[in-house]
Image: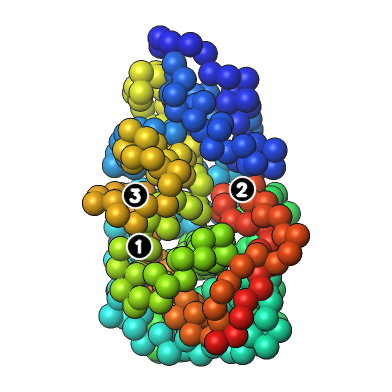
Amino acid sequence: MTGTASTDRVNRFDIYDPDMSRDLDELLDEARSGGCPVAHSAAHGGYYLLTRYADVTAVLSNDAVFSSGGGKSIPSRQSIEMPPLDSDPPEHREYRRLLNRFFTKASLAKHEEAIRGIARSLVDGFVGDHRVEILNGFSAPLTGATLCRVILDLDDDELMAEAQTRVAKIGSANSPDAWAELTAFLQKLVQGRTTTGRDDVFNAVLTGTVDGRRLTELEKLGVIIVLFLGGLDTTRAAITCIVRHLALNPGLEARLRDTDWTRSDLDEFLRHDSVVTGLARTVTTETELGGRALAAGDRVLVHYYAANHDPAQFTEPATLDFERRRNPHVAFGLGIHRCLGSNLARLQIKVAFEELLGRVQNIRLAEGAEIEFAAGVARQPIALPIIFDEL
């Protein structure tokens, strides 16, 4: 390996460190532009940090060398595997075969009116106050209620609130206790449910097969955990981040009132904010990446946010630019592990802003509000208090 050594901060890089989260862009620039772009961090037992778009896409396109097995977080806190996120071919294909049809645009369309009803009810609850803390007052309850219906087939406010609390702990702290709490909560739901005969996600997990066999109880639980965890923290973060842009850039409201904004502008929001910062892969065999020799068993952190802010791929990446001709972002991942729930996320975001902007205008930050982003896998404001005028 040639070139200068990484900075001390890069050598200690940890996505769960709040201080590093505050300087995230600066740190990633240091790692990306240094003489050793595949930097090594000593945090959590040691791993390699991938910040360049070319390296990230290379890893995401090579599941044979960079395995999804062993958990997707650093440090690994999972008590069980979570397929299909943690599975490699050929098993991965079988899990996706079981689930894919429930997440097509056509299949999800039947849920739109229910999602719209949830969003409308939430806006009804705060519109007269002319203010709301958008994360906990709108984004989180909307995505939580949506997933409880689409994934868990639940219609219970207390259970939905409990589910949101469990997932929030995973996104911010990644502690063993947080994983244990979420696992126990969803295990209770899985064990307490029987097959319904309906053609829905939950029933498919309970009765489906992989390679001709029924899923084990742990596999069922793992699938439900990843569907719920993957959909809640990420989509609420995306909605909250877009509201932040509206509050800081008044001219954006008119643009988002255009019903076609989700066809192209949404991808620029997703690229710019990249709410899933990074997930891990495990090297399966000796290889080289970005001039760095890697050995079997090495862990790499695929930093999606860094890749989406790589100036070698995106001109002026820090700028929210809706005129980009090409936007091959990796906010939803790439390859066989591209986000299963991307269509559901897009649908929720579309409905959320149609209902919100149908009732409010002139969104701005509440007086004295200071925006701080959470550390962890999901990058979002810790809180976003806004004020607005009622339409």
The reply, left or right, for residue 144 in relation to residue 158 is left
C-alpha gap between disc 1 and disc 2: 26 Å
Q: Nearer the viewer, residue 72 or 303?
A: 303
For residue 106, which quarter of the picture?
Answer: bottom left
* Type of the residue with mark 3: His
SS class of the residue under badge 2? loop
The residue that appears at 56% across and 53% down in the rendered structure is 378
Which numbered dot is residue 265? 1
| Quadrant containing the C terminus in the rendered view | bottom right
Instruction: Please tell me whether residue 255 is drawn above or below residue 329 in the rendered image.
Output: below
Coordinates of residue 214 in the picture (x, y in percent): 40, 69
Q: Residue at x 24, y 51 (%)?
A: 325
- Which residue is at 49% across, 79% downward? 357
Amino acid of disc 2: Gly
What numbered label is drawn on residue 329? Answer: 3
Of callouts 3 and 2, which one flags the residue occurring earlier in the amino acid sequence? 3
Q: Secondary structure at mark 1?
A: helix
Instruction: Give residue 376's mark.
Output: 2
